[in-house]
């Protein structure tokens, strides 16, 4: 009996010790986790302050007169990094194509294809496919050798475009300023009993069109998308470009949540009166980034620094190549306008969304500022790297 009593006391002592060790281990783990989280938080704050200070120094060292707007936001840690004149409305140039492309993906879907040209009721409908050339239309028309084509409608130039902005092109969506040349966008045929016929057009996916818009800044592709949006949302309208512009505005207000007044006159940014702010451009990009089906399209179809599109030459430095994904915008009249918006992929894994809008300065000077901005966004604190 005495031995049994001793065993019970010993067992109780052992169980009690194990429990205390377990509690201590749990407490230790929680303390370690809390310390780690604090360290990570402090590291993020420290890195952000370093980057903010570097960007501020970059802005203050600009010795060129002109208008400057910059906004940088950390998509990984979800906080603002830097902003200067970020809410000011500024000339957008071809960064307007970001809004047009993302809006098109929203309304058409990411697998949309432009309708091929069709002959129906003696009328040729090109389907707003920008990849259909004048030669393609002539081949289709060749099936009707006794027809007398007449122009039903053409693509109108935006009132603020300069005469040389959009002239001759081999694409079906041709812009004619004045009566110098006429492109038969829609024909009428004599034979009213002609059956509906489809024509196999060249590559006409929305991806192919937006790739040309974003990587190569094609104004024709962008305007064809604007017209397609107008036709899709209001088929009976005789002014699809006006409906398209209204669609871009509504998308900004209803989907992006932009309540500020903006100025949108076209879908390609050729109009010098187009006005968005750096923060609005980043919000447009953030919307696309947060949309699961649009994000991979953007990462693939936007220009990549030092690799393709308009960023291949502009950002071809070894320390920047492949790390900036974005869209450029340039207008040399009525004064120098240069914009750049996109994503910066840092070596520490953070992804920044940014926009820089420059105007009333030489485009060459603006490009220097844009290069320095991109280099700064990718920079790391070398002093900290050495101590670590």
Image: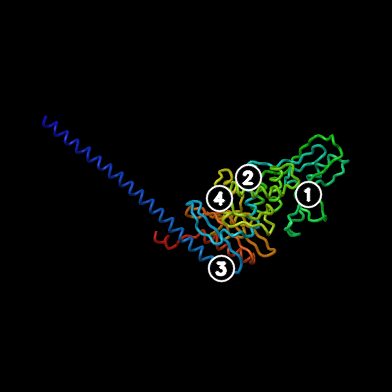
Asked if disc 3 and disc 2 are in contact, CB closer than 8 Å, the reply is no
Q: CA distance from mark 4 to mark 3?
A: 28 Å
Side (left or right) of 264 relative to 178? left
Q: CA distance from mark 4 to mark 1?
A: 35 Å
Give the camera-side residue of 303 and 339: 339
Label 1 or label 3, whichever comes before in sequence order = 3
Residue at 55% across, 43% down: 292
Label 3 or label 2, whichever comes before in sequence order = 3
The label on residue 105 is 2
Residue 191 x/y as whole percent: 86, 37
Residue 257 x/y as whole percent: 57, 49
Q: Secondary structure at mark 4?
A: helix
Q: CA distance from mark 3 to mark 2?
A: 37 Å
Residue pointed to by mark 3: 62
Other residues around mark 2 within 10 Å, as few (<14) / some (14–19) / many (≥20):
some
The label on residue 286 is 4
Q: Secondary structure at mark 3?
A: loop
Q: Secondary structure at mark 2?
A: helix
Q: CA distance from mark 1 to mark 2?
A: 25 Å
Residue 32 x/y as whole percent: 34, 49
Asked if disc 2 and disc 4 are in contact, CB closer than 8 Å, the reply is no
Residue pointed to by mark 1: 154
Q: CA distance from mark 2 to mark 4?
A: 14 Å
Label 4 or label 1, whichever comes before in sequence order = 1
Residue 331 x/y as whole percent: 67, 61
Label 1 or label 2, whichever comes before in sequence order = 2
């Amino acid at each position: 009996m005495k031995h049994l009593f001793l065993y019970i006391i010993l067992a109780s002592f052992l169980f009690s010790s194990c429990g205390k060790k377990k509690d201590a281990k749990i407490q230790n783990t929680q303390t370690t986790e809390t310390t780690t989280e604090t360290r990570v938080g402090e590291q993020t704050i420290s890195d952000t302050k370093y980057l903010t200070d570097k960007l501020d120094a970059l802005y203050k060292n600009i010795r060129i007169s002109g208008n400057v707007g910059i906004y940088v936001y950390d998509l990984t840690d979800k906080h603002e990094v830097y902003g200067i004149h970020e809410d000011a409305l500024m000339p957008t140039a071809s960064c307007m194509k970001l809004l047009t492309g993302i809006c098109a993906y929203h309304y058409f879907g990411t697998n949309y294809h432009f309708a091929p040209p069709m002959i129906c009721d003696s009328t040729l409908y090109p389907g707003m496919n920008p990849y259909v050339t004048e030669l393609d239309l002539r081949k289709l028309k060749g099936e009707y050798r006794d027809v007398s084509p007449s122009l039903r409608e053409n693509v109108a130039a935006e009132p603020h475009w300069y005469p040389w902005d959009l002239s001759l092109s081999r694409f079906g969506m041709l812009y004619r300023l004045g009566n110098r040349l006429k492109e038969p966008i829609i024909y009428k045929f004599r034979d009213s009993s002609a059956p509906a016929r489809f024509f196999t057009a060249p590559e006409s996916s929305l991806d192919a069109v937006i790739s040309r818009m974003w990587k190569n800044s094609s104004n024709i592709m962008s305007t064809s998308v604007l017209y397609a949006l107008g036709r899709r949302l209001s088929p009976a309208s005789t002014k699809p470009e006006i409906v398209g512009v209204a669609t871009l505005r509504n998308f900004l207000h209803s989907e992006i949540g932009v309540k500020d007044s903006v100025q949108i006159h076209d879908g390609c940014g050729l109009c010098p009166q187009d006005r968005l702010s750096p923060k609005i451009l980043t919000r447009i990009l953030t919307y696309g980034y947060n949309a699961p089906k649009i994000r991979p399209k953007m990462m693939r179809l936007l220009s990549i620094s030092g690799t393709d599109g308009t960023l291949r030459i502009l950002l071809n430095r070894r320390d920047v190549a492949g790390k900036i994904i974005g869209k450029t915008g340039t207008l040399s009249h009525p004064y120098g306008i240069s914009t750049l918006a996109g994503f910066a992929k840092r070596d520490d894994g953070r992804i920044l969304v940014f926009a820089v809008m420059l105007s009333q300065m030489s485009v060459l000077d603006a490009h220097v500022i844009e290069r320095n901005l991109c280099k700064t966004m990718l920079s790391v604190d070398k002093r900290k790297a050495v101590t670590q």
